[in-house]
Image (cartoon, rainbow, N blue to C red):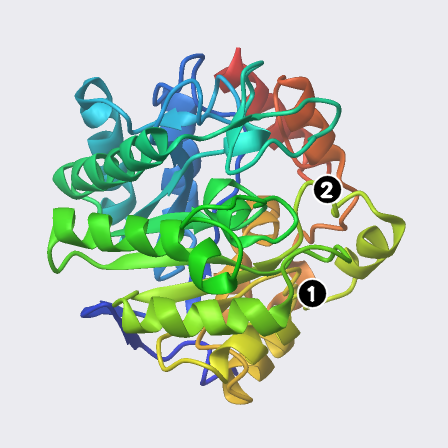
């Protein structure tokens, strides 16, 4: 029914069996302290069984606790966590999907009191500490060491989290980077740190594919906009990035009324992906409420992107790919953008989709307890 959506594609020298990938989604299923739990493994087993070509595991911190968004953020900052990461990679690959792990430093959005950032710009009532050059170099090295662990753990790819307004994006944004040294000012200087991280990671892992979660527009009047992010995308492509996964918005814009309304529209970030695709010749992932097979097919067929990322859509119904492939879309349990799950995550308790049947909710509640 959808010939483009179920054709293979080469990414970073690896073959993806179709154009569907699981986009990273934090649900708080890891244990306290960032350990890999049985519930987390079961979750990713289900995601891999869905039929997507690649599963991108949610952000793993390169620097705990300073870089962790919460105390349930997966950890990749020490060898102690290799066994758990290997368990995740093995589980995903056993189900026929490629396994990718996203690495992150949360910067001014970290779940700690003493936050760090490129500059001391107020964030939800707190002012983070501006990073020194030595601290910048140290974080760069931590990204590289964490990427080597991802490779050692058996994943097929690694993704750098430059989206959602986290540290890599904070350096790029004129809103959050007010530095006067070689890491701030012009776009050429603001993009220095994320490009250095990419270079350090690639040096650490060799020909292991490295992707990038990409913030195309902060959707804030004084933030990063498409004109500058497009130029940055060209630099990433020249730097050997395997793919670019495009998104819009940060924690400071997600709650704006106009952005809430925008996010309820099908394919609300596809235009950003299409804009970046026009600038580079590496595979582009489009995401953002791509709820139907028809829309996903249109995104690929019209060359707005090369791959479709499914996050909450896949979590709400892991059978989404098969139901689409078999022409059973009327049976899909569809995310309705109620955002109740996001509130559950913020509260730190058990997270489930309110669209799930009661039996499934009870089964997953038992896993959490």
Q: Secondary structure at mark 2?
A: loop
In the rendered structure, which disc, 2 or 1, sits on the residue that comes first in sequence? Answer: 2
Q: Position of residue 334 (x, y in %)?
A: 69, 54
Toward which corner of the image does residue 208 lie, by quadrant? bottom left
Q: CA distance from mark 2 to mark 1?
A: 36 Å
Q: Secondary structure at mark 1?
A: helix
Please state which of residues 298 and 112 is positioned toward the viewer in this rendering: 112
Of marks 2 and 1, the one in the foreground? 2
**Label at residue 252:** 2
Please state which of residues 343 and 211 is positioned toward the viewer in this rendering: 211
Please state which of residues 3 and 82 is positioned toward the viewer in this rendering: 82
- Residue visible at 34% across and 58% down? 211
- Residue visible at 16% across and 40% down? 148
Mark 1 crowdedness (10 Å alpha carbons): few <14, some 14-19, many ≥20 = few
Mark 2 crowdedness (10 Å alpha carbons): few <14, some 14-19, many ≥20 = some
Q: How many marks?
A: 2
Mark 1 sits on what residue?
Answer: 330
Residue 186 vertical position relative to residue 184 in the rendered view, above or below: below
- Residue visible at 61% across and 44% down? 176
Residue 225 vertical position relative to residue 365 in the rendered view, above or below: below
Q: Position of residue 155 (x, y in %)?
A: 22, 46
Residue 18 in view of the camera: no
Toward which corner of the image does residue 3 lie, by quadrant? bottom left
Residue at the farthest front position: 180
280 relative position to 292: left or right: left
Residue 159 in view of the camera: yes
């Amino acid at each position: 029914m959808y010939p483009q959506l179920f054709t293979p594609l080469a990414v970073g020298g690896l073959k993806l069996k179709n154009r569907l990938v699981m986009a990273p989604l934090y649900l708080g299923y890891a244990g306290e302290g960032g350990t890999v739990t049985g519930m987390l493994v079961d979750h990713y087993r289900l995601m891999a069984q869905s039929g997507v070509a690649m599963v991108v595991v949610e952000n793993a911190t390169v620097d705990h606790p300073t870089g962790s968004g919460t105390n349930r953020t997966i950890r990749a900052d020490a060898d102690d966590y290799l066994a758990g990461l290997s368990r995740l990679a093995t589980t995903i690959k056993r189900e026929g999907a490629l396994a990718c792990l996203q690495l992150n430093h949360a910067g001014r959005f970290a779940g700690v009191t003493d936050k760090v950032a490129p500059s001391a710009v107020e964030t939800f009532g707190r002012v983070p500490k501006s990073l020194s050059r030595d601290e910048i170099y140290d974080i760069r090295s931590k990204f590289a060491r964490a990427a080597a662990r991802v490779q050692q753990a058996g994943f097929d790819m690694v993704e750098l989290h430059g989206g959602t307004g986290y540290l890599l994006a904070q350096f790029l944004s004129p809103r959050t980077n007010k530095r006067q040294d070689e890491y701030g000012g012009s776009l050429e200087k603001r993009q220095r740190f994320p490009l250095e991280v990419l270079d350090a990671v690639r040096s650490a892992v060799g020909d292991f594919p490295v992707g990038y979660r990409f913030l195309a527009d902060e959707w804030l009047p004084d933030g990063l906009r498409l004109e500058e992010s497009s130029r940055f995308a060209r630099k990433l492509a020249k730097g050997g990035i395997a793919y670019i996964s495009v998104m819009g918005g940060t924690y400071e814009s997600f709650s704006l009324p106009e952005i809430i309304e925008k996010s309820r529209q099908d394919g609300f970030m596809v235009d950003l992906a299409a804009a970046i695709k026009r600038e580079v010749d590496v595979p582009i992932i489009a995401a953002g409420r791509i709820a139907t097979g028809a829309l996903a097919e249109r995104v690929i067929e019209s060359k707005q992107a090369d791959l479709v990322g499914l996050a909450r859509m896949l979590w709400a119904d892991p059978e989404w790919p098969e139901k689409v492939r078999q022409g059973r879309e009327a049976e899909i349990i569809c995310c309705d953008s109620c955002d109740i799950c996001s509130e559950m995550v913020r509260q730190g308790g058990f997270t489930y989709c309110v669209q799930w049947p009661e039996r499934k909710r009870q089964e997953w509640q038992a896993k959490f307890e």
